[in-house]
Each structure stands twice: as C-alpha cells, then as structure tokens.
Image (spheres, rainbow, N blue to C red):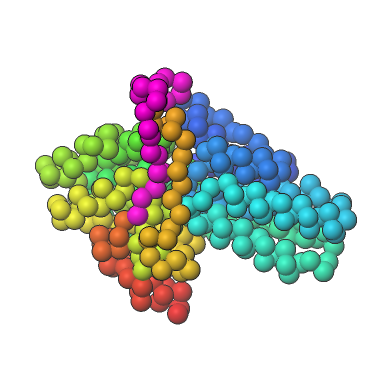
Amino acid sequence: MQVESRNVETLRWRAGRLELIDQRRLPLEFEYVACDNALQTAAAIRDMVVRGAPAIGCSAAYGVALEAQAHAAATRAQFDAALEQAFAALAASRPTAVNLFWAIERMRQCHAQMRGGATRAEAAALLELARQIARDDVAINRALGRHGAGLIADGARVMTHCNAGALATAGHGTALGVIRSARDAGKRISVIANETRPYLQGARLTAWEMVQENIPVTLVTDNMAGHLMQRGHVDLIVVGADRIAANGDTANKIGTYTVAVLAERHRIPFYIAAPLSTIDLAIADGSAIPIEERDAAEVTGFRGLRWAPEGVNVANPAFDVTPAALITGLVTEKGVVERPDAAKIRALFGR
Ligand code: MRU
C-alpha cells in the first residue's frame, strides 16, 4: 500500500512572523518560537532553535524576508542598509552548512534585481522567494526520498547518524526522507538511530520523529555502532550532509566519519542523502570545509549537569569530513550518484 507520510512543520510563516519548532526542547516539550526580524532569526540559528542544513537555509531566507517587511515603508537607502545587515548577521550565524549561504545568495540576487523598484514590492518578492525556497525543499526531499527508497530492501535495518529528518529541513527530511519514502512505498524497515554525542540530535530528534510515525527505531550510543555492524545487525547506512565538496568529500555531524570507516570495514553500503544546494563546487575537497567549533559546555556536561572536572581542556568540533572514497552513493533529487567523484558531481550541474 502506498501512503504519504505527514509532515512535521519545522518552520512556518504565521501572521507575518517566522515560527520555528524549538528543537532545543524536544522531545520533552513541543513549542514554537517566533522571529520578527533577521537578528532574531540569526540568533535562533546560532542557538540551535532550528538546525540541520536545509532548515537553516530556509530560515535564513525567511530572516531576510522579515527584515525587508520591517523596512518596507523606509527609504530605499534605509531598506538597503537593513538588508545588508541582515545578510551579514545571518551569514555569521553558523559556518559549516552551505545551504545557509546558498539561500542568502538567492535572496541577495532577488534584492539585486529589484533594487531599482519600490521597497514594498521588493519586500513582497523576497517573502515569496523565501516561501518558494521552503516549498521547493519539501519537493526536493520527496524526490530524493523516492530515489533513495529504491536502495532499501524490504525488511532492511537502516542506521543513521544525527538528525537529517523533517526537523532538519522544511519537511520530509533527507536521510529520514529516504527512510520515510521507503516506508511509504510499503517496505518494512527499522531504524538504528545513533545517539549523536554531544548534542544528541539522534536521541532527541531522530528517535522522536520515528516514534511519531510508528517507524520502528532502536536508539544506541555512538560507540555501539561498530559492534552492531560486526554482529550483522546493520544492512545499510544513510546520513545527511552539511557541505559536499566538488570531489564528493562530505561534511556531516561529528561521528559520521567513524561510521563510514566502520561501514567500509564491514562492507555495509554507506549513503549520503542531500539536495544539490548542499554541494559547494567552490570547494575542491573536504580539507577546505570550515568546521564549526562549539561550546566546551556541550562536552563537559548537559543542561546544567557537569560531569567533567573544572580545568580540563575540551575540543568540540561539530562536524567531520567523510572522504568520497568511503561513500557508496550520493542520493540527490536528480538521482543516485554511485561512488561520487568530481566528474560525476559536475555532471549533476550539467557542467
Ligand atoms: O549541528 P546540526 O544539528 O545542525 O547538524 C545537522 C547535521 O549534521 C545533519 O546531518 C545535516 O545538516 C543534514 S540535515 C538534512
């Protein structure tokens, strides 16, 4: 039986405001946080109210639209200055996911095209573009999900890392989009969700999404992944991406590289699911991808509980890079690229 999975509304436009599910509070509380301008939106991205590469891109687009709306009655000079500040604040919110910069660039191009006209008309056009980016994201994820679903056998046990679900996008998800689409196509699948230390996107968000939809899910801590693979409990791995270099090297949540190395060792297919907006052709290989370093407090404890001694040195890189050589395939809205490399990735863009 074919069913179409319901969407979690990660971000929505309501009464002239951007509303975001507060992902810091999930799964204990479900509530929306409202943003009225670009600075508030940038803060929501920085503070992880919203996270996940496509979701922060869509939020940034709405952040620009909010700022334009707030200055729609201002002079052209004031309007332009406010937008420049919005672009800068949003671009400074998080460094690794390229979808953020991709979305800002699209908004900037719209601004450049409409600069000769009325500010009210431009504000309306920017809002329409933000809405379009969010609508397209859902459609892209559904297309990507259909391509990826073909890779998953009935009864497969699928491991994922971090949260690349509806919560990380405007809807449906990328890695979890593949899982949802496989389920929607009638396949019985179960998910192994890696907890994803230190921020626990797997335990808090992926597990929540799967439980909401009655997709069987088993939560494990990250250091259990190798054991499960060795014992033959994992059939396939699919994860999302924050930035894919021109040669296919892929930055994703810290710990993804470890999972990919283990997958190679155990000959388990390892797939990246991501839209083309996650590919950064300007970066030749993964070594040049900026890796966000986050607060030490995420490693020394959680929500006020501290377990590490005062005075200890801490490293907290939020992402790592999986070399293209470890990637079985890249699942995009244009199809699955087996063993991605520079030529195959260029071909996706018709180059
Ligand atoms: O730090 P986060 O939670 O923003 O990191 C998210 C990830 O690493 C996701 O896997 C990635 O953005 C893909 S989301 C479809």
Extreme residue in the front direction: 311
On the question of residue 137 being in view, the answer is no
Seen in the image, is 152 located left or right of residue 287?
left
Residue in the image at 59% along x and 39% along y: 44
Residue in the image at 77% along x and 52% along y: 82
- Residue 135 sits inside the magenta stretch: no
> In the rendered image, which quarter is residue 109 located in?
bottom right
On the question of residue 52 being in view, the answer is yes
Q: How many marks?
A: 0
In percent of width and height, residue 250 lies at 36, 58
In percent of width and height, residue 33 lies at 62, 34
In this rendered view, identify the residue nearer to me: 28 or 110.
110
In percent of width and height, residue 204 lies at 40, 33
Residue in the image at 22% along x and 41% along y: 225
In this rendered view, identify the residue nearer to me: 92 or 271.
92
Extreme residue in the top direction: 305
> In the rendered image, which quarter is residue 264 located in?
bottom left
> Where's the C terminus, which quadrant?
bottom left
> In this picture, which residue range is highlighted in magenta?
301-321
Extreme residue in the bottom direction: 351
Q: Which SS does the magenta portion mostly show?
A: loop
In this rendered view, identify the residue nearer to me: 17 or 247.
247
Residue in the image at 42% along x and 19% along y: 305
In percent of width and height, residue 84 lies at 72, 56
Seen in the image, is 120 located left or right of residue 271?
right
